[in-house]
């Protein structure tokens, strides 16, 4: 009967199982120490249940021995929150000292991969008495472990006496799901080397590499100040630390995890999740998300903050309960959102975003492969290190690229700023360039206008020829400037084209060279021109060649001082034209040599001489011409500019050729160069009763023009630069100074400041003339002590009015000072330099009151001035000559003494330095209207 058969079979199985389990009499293992390694899998029985009860003592007492079954019958994988009791007995054949009892993992091929959370090992004797109780396990604080040294292996020490049986109970309990639970006991001699956890090798490498990246990232953040490095550093830190926590034998982790083992899993969770969070923070800052999409940036920010807060809450909950509470929800919720953001990044058309997405995709691919490898599909390579290492490399390259981009942007920013600086400097200078000729045109025009003020509309006037010339020269200068500027802008817009034609190129250059001869003569410059003795027929662009050549030559003349040398050397063959322009001028410093061809660049101190366009034009025109320009120069010795230009037909494109032959017209230098007025300085003072004015202006024409405006009302002195002006002011003590601001050697500001600080000249009013119209400059001028300020082009009448005003003001001041002295000779309160000067003068007189020898010469000496300087200064300040002042002071003191009745008139006369009583009486009467005895 089949039914019976089945019942029998079932019975057989049941009985068989029962019999088998009963037959599993605990067999005793014989431990022969000659053999250093003993696997006890087959001699161990196991008793398992959920939870962590009953008490250990009950199990060890042997009361539950029946519940143990052979370890080999344990089919299911060991789980967390279950207790596994192992039991085996052994008798040693020889004495054993400090051997290891270790636990190995049954299921994984990796053997000693992980530690259990809690392991208690009881060695008992045949009477179930405990011999030793040892503890190990990753959650057991180090101080409670029998083996304090870690690597992550479950092991305890034991010893045995020969012939004595020991029964060993091992209790294993795990909180948290750890990958593999080790439950196979083995005994081994300490002399055997410990098996290293296999997975460890790779992990150590990863930890090492990630750690290095962390350090480097923080280092770079510190020095480069690029925030993405900071986030990348935190990301790699979380990554390396969360690996580390699995391996508490590494020094850093060793300091806090072993004694606080409960921390490790919550911390692992916290760091693992934050590595994701900071991976996204890194992306946000790396691609500069805020600049790509404000909404995505905002959304990502809030998402990451929320994620981070949730993860921290989970950390606290886990630490308290030793269970995962929110982790699953966090992962299920946040991972898809994270993927969404990575996909969003992929849609930005931005190189950095692409880098980031590439790194992220790499990481995702190898993480998936890694999980597959861990689960079942064993791959021929380990995907984890490739994934980690690869992303680190991709992001490092990305970061380096970003730094380069930043550098570029910064350099560009700096370049723009520099360009702006140069431009604004240029505008200030160019306005000066414009304003000076404009003044010189406007001035004569106004004068003409005044002469026809009362005449009919169509009345004709006579204009002095020199005025017409001045105006013409200055309109030419303006036109030249405007043309240069237009050339530059044409070059910029690409509208400047070559227009070459066939002709005798040498003839043109010769003509141009000769046109500078009169200039050489006027400046007394040795001027040599060398050229081949043939005709050179070639293709050339007359306009550009002329501009290049005259610009170089006029620079040479402009910068070479009188009696210097300028030489032009022209060479030519069939293919090329070369010329050198050499001068013995001041030369150009090495640092400046690179820059003189930049637009608007001017060597410091030469700003007044040009606009900084000439050489830029030369260079850009030469480049357009497909030629070369070079310069060699040594400060103090001179400069040499060399130009090489093609003149053969093949060098030019078809459209650059002009059919008409170039007629070589006799070239002339620009009129402003040719005729620049070299008006000599004439400082002869004729009418001495008029106020003395000093004009300091480097532009000879403008100086001349100012002179013409003022010469009827004033005596005039002239100086061509600030330092000469200052010297002349000190020497001559003029009544007023009119000075330009932009001048060579010393500008107007510096001169005014020096004048105001010098005791000899401090009283002299200064009017500054400038092209810089800005308020800032005005303030700068007034701060340095200038008394007034006029912007070019100025009105001659206005200048006259201002001069008169200042001179009138001085008169008032003089009265004030003079009054002061009369009232209290010894108490002139010192405030300004002038007042200090006066009080010094008064003190000097008072101290020498009784010296009849003390006169003007001595007073001048005491004041460290010459007689005439002192004279002019005192007259300017108090309208009194030094001798008058000395006499008056003496008499005032005499009057004071007489009023006090301190002495007889003849004694007083002697006291105040009069050695003749009659002379004293005479002077006293003159001054006060009464004789000394009447006081
Ligand atoms: P600028 O119109 O101011 O002369 P350039 O472009 O012609 O402008 O020259 C630029 C700078 O180069 C000038 O400020 C000047 O200092 C310097 N430089 C040009 N040529 C010479 C030269 N032959 N000798 C000395 N310095 C020169």
Image (spheres, grey):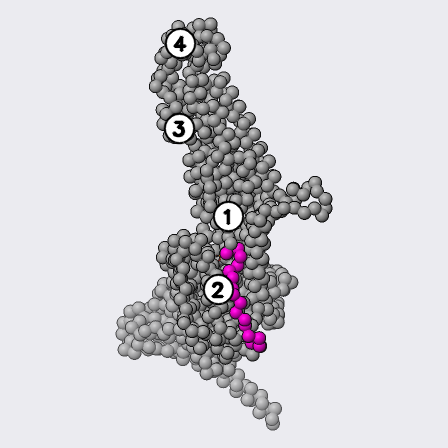
Q: Which mark is residue 275?
A: none
Q: Tag 4's secondary structure?
A: helix
Circle nearer the N terminus (3, 1): 1
Q: Residues within 10 Å of mark 2 (few under 14, many from 20)?
A: many
Gap in angstroms between the C-alphas marked 3 and 4: 28 Å
Q: Which residue is mark 1?
A: 699
Q: Is residue 664 magenta?
A: yes
Q: Nearer the viewer, residue 665 or 625?
A: 665
Which corner quadrant of the image does residue 356 belong to? bottom right
Q: Which mark is residue 918?
A: 4
In the rendered structure, are the residues bearing label 4 and label 2 in contact, judged by CB atoms less than 8 Å apart? no
Tell me which segment is drawn in magenta: 657-674
Q: Residues within 10 Å of mark 3 (few under 14, many from 20)?
A: some
In the rendered structure, are the residues bearing label 3 and label 2 in contact, judged by CB atoms less than 8 Å apart? no
Q: Nearer the viewer, residue 257 or 690?
A: 690
Q: Which mark is residue 867?
A: 3
Circle nearer the N terminus (3, 4): 3
Residue beneath the point at 52% across and 86% down: 13
């Amino acid at each position: 009967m089949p039914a019976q058969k089945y019942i029998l079979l079932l019975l057989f199985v049941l009985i068989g199982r029962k019999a088998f389990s009963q037959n599993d009499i605990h067999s005793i293992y014989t431990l022969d120490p000659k053999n250093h390694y003993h696997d006890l899998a087959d001699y161990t029985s196991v008793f398992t249940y959920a939870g962590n009860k009953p008490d250990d003592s009950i199990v060890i007492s042997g009361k539950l021995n029946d519940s143990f079954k052979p370890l080999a019958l344990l089919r299911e994988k060991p789980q967390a929150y279950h207790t596994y009791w192992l039991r085996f007995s052994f008798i040693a054949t020889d004495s054993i000292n400090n051997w290891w009892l270790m636990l190995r993992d049954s299921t994984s091929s990796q053997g000693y991969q992980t530690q259990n959370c809690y392991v208690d090992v009881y060695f008992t004797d045949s009477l179930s008495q405990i011999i030793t109780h040892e503890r190990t396990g990753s959650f057991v604080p180090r101080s409670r472990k029998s083996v304090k040294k870690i690597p992550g292996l479950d092991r305890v020490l034991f010893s045995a006496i020969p012939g004595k049986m020991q029964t060993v109970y091992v209790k294993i309990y795990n909180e948290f799901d750890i990958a593999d639970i080790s439950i196979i006991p083995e005994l081994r001699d300490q002399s055997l080397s410990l098996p290293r956890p296999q997975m460890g090798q790779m992990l150590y490498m990863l930890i090492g590499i990630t750690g290095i990246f962390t350090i480097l990232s923080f280092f770079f953040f510190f020095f480069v100040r690029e925030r993405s490095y900071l986030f990348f550093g935190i990301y790699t830190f979380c990554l390396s630390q969360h690996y580390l926590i699995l391996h508490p034998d590494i020094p850093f982790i060793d300091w806090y995890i072993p004694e606080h083992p409960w921390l490790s899993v919550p911390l692992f969770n916290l760091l693992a999740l934050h590595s994701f969070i900071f991976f996204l923070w890194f992306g946000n800052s790396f691609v500069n998300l805020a600049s790509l999409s404000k909404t995505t940036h905002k959304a990502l920010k809030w998402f990451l903050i929320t994620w981070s807060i949730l993860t921290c809450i989970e950390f606290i909950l886990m630490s308290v309960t030793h269970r995962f509470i929110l982790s699953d929800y966090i992962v299920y919720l946040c991972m898809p959102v994270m993927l969404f953001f990575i996909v969003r990044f992929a849609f930005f058309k931005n190189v950095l975003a692409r880098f980031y997405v590439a790194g992220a995709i790499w990481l995702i691919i190898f993480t998936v492969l890694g999980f597959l490898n861990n689960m079942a599909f064993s791959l021929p390579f380990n995907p984890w290190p490739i994934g980690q290492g690869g992303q680190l490399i991709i992001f490092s390259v990305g970061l380096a690229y970003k730094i380069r981009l930043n550098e570029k942007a910064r350099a560009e920013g700096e370049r723009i700023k520099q360009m702006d600086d140069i431009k604004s400097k240029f505008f200030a200078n160019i306005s000066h360039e414009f304003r000076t000729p404009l003044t010189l045109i406007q001035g004569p025009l106004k004068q003409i206008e005044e002469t026809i003020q009362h005449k009919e509309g169509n009345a004709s006037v006579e204009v002095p020829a020199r005025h017409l010339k001045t105006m013409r020269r200055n309109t030419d200068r303006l036109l030249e400037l405007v043309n240069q500027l237009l050339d530059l802008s044409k070059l910029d817009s690409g509208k400047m084209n070559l227009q070459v034609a066939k002709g005798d190129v040498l003839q043109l250059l010769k003509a141009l060279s000769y046109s500078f001869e009169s200039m050489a003569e006027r400046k007394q410059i040795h001027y040599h021109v060398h050229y081949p003795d043939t005709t050179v027929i070639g293709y050339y662009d007359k306009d550009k060649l002329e501009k290049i050549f005259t610009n170089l030559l006029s620079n040479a003349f402009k910068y070479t001082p009188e009696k210097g040398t300028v030489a032009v050397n022209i060479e030519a063959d069939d293919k090329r034209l070369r010329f050198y322009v050499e001068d013995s001028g001041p030369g150009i410093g090495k640092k400046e040599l690179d820059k003189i061809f930049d637009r608007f660049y001017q060597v410091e101190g030469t700003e007044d001489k040009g606009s900084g366009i000439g050489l830029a034009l030369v260079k850009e025109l030469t480049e357009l011409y497909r030629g070369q320009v070079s310069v060699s120069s040594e400060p103090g010795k001179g400069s040499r500019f060399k130009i090489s230009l093609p003149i053969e037909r093949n060098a030019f494109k078809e459209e650059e050729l002009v059919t008409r032959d170039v007629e070589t017209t006799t070239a002339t230098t620009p009129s402003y160069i040719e005729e620049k007025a070299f008006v000599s300085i004439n400082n002869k003072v004729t009418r001495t009763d008029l106020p003395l004015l000093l004009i300091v202006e480097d532009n000879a024409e403008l100086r001349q023009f100012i002179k013409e405006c003022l010469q009827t009302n004033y005596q005039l002195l002239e100086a061509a630069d600030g330092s000469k002006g200052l010297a002349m002011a000190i020497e001559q003590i003029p009544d007023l100074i009119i000075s330009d601001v932009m001048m060579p050697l010393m500008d107007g500001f510096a001169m005014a400041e020096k004048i105001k600080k010098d005791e000899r000249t401090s009283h002299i009013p200064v009017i500054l003339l400038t092209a810089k119209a800005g308020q800032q400059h005005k303030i700068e001028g007034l701060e340095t002590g200038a008394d007034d300020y006029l912007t070019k082009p100025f009105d001659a009448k206005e200048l006259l009015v201002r001069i008169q005003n200042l001179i009138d003001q001085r008169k008032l001041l003089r009265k004030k000072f003079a009054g002061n002295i009369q009232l209290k000779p010894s108490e002139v309160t010192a405030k300004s330099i002038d007042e200090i000067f006066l009080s010094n003068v008064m003190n000097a007189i008072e101290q020498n009151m009784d010296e009849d020898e003390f006169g003007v010469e001595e007073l001048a000496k005491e004041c460290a001035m010459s007689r005439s300087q002192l004279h002019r200064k005192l007259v300017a300040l108090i309208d009194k000559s030094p001798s008058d002042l000395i006499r008056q002071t003496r008499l005032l003191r005499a009057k004071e003494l007489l009023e006090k009745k301190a002495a007889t008139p003849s004694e007083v006369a002697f006291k105040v330095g009069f050695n003749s009583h009659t002379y004293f009486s005479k002077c006293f009467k003159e001054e006060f209207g009464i004789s000394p005895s009447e006081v």
